[in-house]
Amino acid sequence: MCPRSEDFHRTVTLLGDLALYAHTYGADLDFVNEVGPCLAVSLPEPPPGIFPPGYDPTDGPQYPGGQS
């Protein structure tokens, strides 16, 4: 696996582990609220092949309260 793919998968795994931790009894939610956004922002571009060709993450339904 290339380093870029490893970084992406490692960060996604950390986000998943943090989500599991957030739902455990006695979890430090202040920690979760501080670390979660930092991990999400640190996600590198997904490696090729993760999304199908032509995938546009901005294409989708309009959600209530979203931009018109």
Image (tube, grey):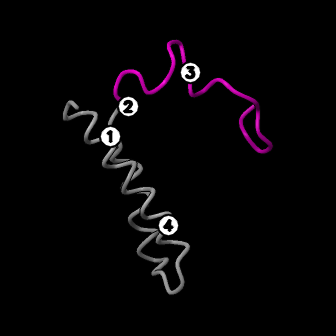
Kindly identify the amino acid type of the residue bearing the numbered disc 3: Asp
Marks 4 and 2 sit apart, C-alpha to C-alpha, by 22 Å
Callout 4: 10 Å neighbours few (<14), some, many (20+)?
few
Q: Residue furthest right?
A: 64
Q: Taken as a whole, is the magenta stretch helix, strand or loop?
A: loop
Residue drawn where x is 34% and y is 49% of the image = 11
Amino acid type, mark 4: Leu
The kind of secondary structure element at disc 4 is helix
Residue that protrudes farthest toward the left in the picture: 3
- Nearer-N-terminus badge (1/4): 1
Q: Which residue is mark 1?
A: 8
63 drawn magenta? yes
Rendering coords of residue 15 (x, y %): 42, 56
Q: Are marks 1 and 3 in contact (CB under 8 Å)?
A: no
Q: Position of residue 29 (x, y in %)?
A: 49, 77
Q: Residues within 10 Å of mark 2 (few under 14, many from 20)?
A: few
Farthest residue in the bottom direction?
A: 26
Mark 2 — residue?
46
- Kindly identify which residue carries mark 4: 20
Vertical order, 5 against 53 (above or below): below
Is 49 in front, or is 28? 49
Closer to us: mark 4 or mark 2?
4
Q: Position of residue 68 (x, y in %)?
A: 76, 30
The residue positioned 42% from the left and 62% from the top of the image is 17
Q: Position of residue 23 (x, y in %)?
A: 55, 73
In magenta, the rendered stretch is 47-68
